[in-house]
Amino acid sequence: MLKILKEKKRLHETAFMGVLTAFCFGLSIFRLIYTDSKVFLFLNWNLFLAFIPWALTSLFILKPTFQKAKISVFILLFVWLLFFPNAPYILTDLFHLKMKTSMPIWFDLVLILSFAWSGLLFGFLSLWDIESIFEQSMKPVYVKIISIILLFVGSFGIYIGRYLRWNSWDIITEPFRLIYDIGNNIINPIHHPRAWGMTLFMGLFLNIIYWSFHLIQRKKS
């Protein structure tokens, strides 16, 4: 495995994300031991869900044969879209930040931001992989447009998870209710201003951060 990671230039990325994940887990365990409160342990589950889209795209990068079949790429994109919103979703866990807790508010801020940043990285790195897969058959300008759209779709997914309380796997367990809720928001946008307000501004925010990464990478190269 190490040899494959080195060949695909994924070793440093994998090691860094592993260390970052361990750091987040360590912070949550320290809080648990110090306060005897499980209040923020759910962040570990949220980070695991954020890890899934990166794990999926990493599999396709490490196994290029998967990229040759259009059906496998379509399945990848579909499953990736189901889980991608979980990556930036952790940003909304800042809603749980409160002044009166058993820990200093600065610690809880560092805790949540560490998980949120790790989730964003998992999501953005996986989107970067999606771009590299699409660039094999598309012009770069089209790939960039698709990335912009996917970030807005992900923002809508954040709204669905935070306010409508749907999970990624509900597409299997309760597909008709999920489709109804999504369709209702799309067909009647005027009646759902919060949905489209959050989608628009969160989408703009995610695009700003994501393309900032691209700018830094471009300047470095």
Image (cartoon, helix red, strand yellow):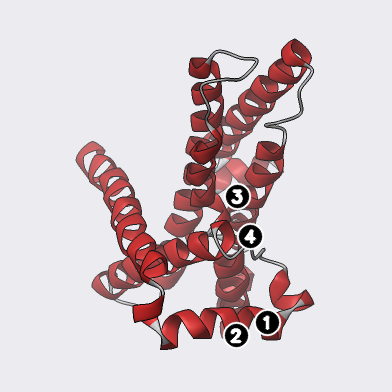
- Give the number of the disc on residue 139: none
Which residue corresponds to mark 3?
50
- Tell me which label, 3 or 4, sits earlier in the chain: 3
Q: Nearer the viewer, mark 3 or mark 2?
A: 2
- Residue contact between numbered discs 1 and 2, judged by CB atoms under 8 Å: yes
Seen at 52% across and 51% down, the residue is 89
- Tell me which label, 3 or 1, sits earlier in the chain: 3
Q: Is residue 108 left or right of residue 201?
A: right
Vertical relation: 209 (above or below) 61: above
> In the rendered image, which quarter contains the N terminus?
top right
> In the rendered image, which quarter contains the C terminus?
top left
Q: Is residue 216 left or right of residue 206?
A: left
The spot of residue 37 in percent (x, y) is 76, 23
Q: Farthest residue toward the left?
A: 219
Which residue corresponds to mark 1?
177
Which residue corresponds to mark 4?
56
The spot of residue 122 in percent (x, y) is 53, 46
Seen at 58% across and 75% down, the residue is 78
Among the 4 quarters of the image, the one containing residue 115 = top right
Seen at 23% across and 45% down, the residue is 215
- Residue contact between numbered discs 3 and 2, judged by CB atoms under 8 Å: no
User: Which residue is more in the foreground, 160 or 101?
Assistant: 101
Which residue corresponds to mark 2?
180
Res. 57 visible in picture:
no
Q: Nearer the viewer, mark 3 or mark 4?
A: 3
The CA distance from mark 1 to mark 2 is 5 Å
The CA distance from mark 3 to mark 1 is 24 Å
- Tell me which label, 3 or 2, sits earlier in the chain: 3
User: Which residue is more in the foreground, 155 or 149?
Assistant: 155
